[in-house]
Image: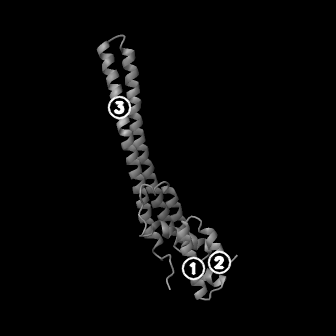
Amino acid sequence: MNYIEDLAENLIGLPEEERQEALFYYEAYIYEGHLTDAQAVAELGTPKNLARRLLADYYVGDEKEVSFENTKSPFKLARVIIQAVFASPILIPVMIAFLAVIFAVLIIFITLVLTVLIFIGAIGIAGVISSIGGILILTQSVLGGLFYISCGITLIGLVMILSPISLIVINWLKLMFNLVIKWIGKKMVNKKGVRHES
């Protein structure tokens, strides 16, 4: 296999149009520079490392905007950036700091999502318990039972109202997570530059 074929195998994560454009660019670069496969590896890095850097450049590049539809897997973006950092010739302490920041952002994201879900769940459980308690109290005190039943129904209604809002908040948190990861990736990956301009 030659350099371009190896690069093509490792660029599977890119959309087809971007993949073809990158392959055409590097094929022309190698052809115009009269580079052998060994010289291409020396100048551009291994095809696998170049592919990782290109993937990271694609995902953290300025021309792409992250949208709600694009945030299906924020962890994929973090994985691509981490692979690009390991593929780039960066010092070990910088990589460790980068991974620590990614881990901290991930923990914050998971904590916020769990907070929203636990809050909604707690309100729902309180509503169900209040309704059941109200039904049990009805035999002793009609007004007290009706009060607890109405509180339970109110809390269950509140859960129904807050559920769509919580989904919007979780999607927003996912978007913010992607933007933070993208910003960190730009700061780390683009220090050396990914593309080789003639």
Residue that appears at 30% across and 20% down = 147
Mark 3 Cα shell of 10 Å, populated few (<14), some (14-19), many (≥20): some
Mark 2 Cα shell of 10 Å, populated few (<14), some (14-19), many (≥20): some
Check disc 3 and report the residue beneath it. 157
- Spatial CA span between label 2 and label 1: 9 Å
Query: Which quadrant holds residue 25?
Result: bottom right
**Dot label at residue 3:** 2
**Dot label at residue 67:** none
- Disc nearer the start of the sequence (1/3): 1
Colouring convention used in this rendered image of the protein: one colour
Mark 1 falls on what kind of element?
helix
**Residue 25, above or below 127:** below
Residue that appears at 41% across and 55% down = 175
Q: In this view, does 193 lie to the left or right of 16?
A: left
Tell me which amino acid carries mark 3.
Gly
Check disc 1 and report the residue beneath it. 26
- Spatial CA span between label 1 and label 3: 59 Å
Tell me which amino acid carries mark 1.
Tyr
**Residue 163, above or below 54:** above
- Spatial CA span between label 2 and label 3: 61 Å
Q: Position of residue 40 (x, y in %)?
A: 61, 82
Q: Nearer the viewer, residue 93 or 160?
A: 160
Mark 2 and mark 1 residues within 8 Å of each other at the beta carbon: yes
Q: Is residue 4 left or right of residue 73?
A: right
Quadrant including the N terminus? bottom right
**Residue 23, above or below 158:** below
Q: Furthest residue to the top?
A: 140
- Disc nearer the start of the sequence (2/1): 2
Mark 2 falls on what kind of element?
helix
Q: Where is residue 106 in the image (x, y as percent from the top left)?
A: 46, 54
Q: Position of residue 189 (x, y in %)?
A: 48, 71
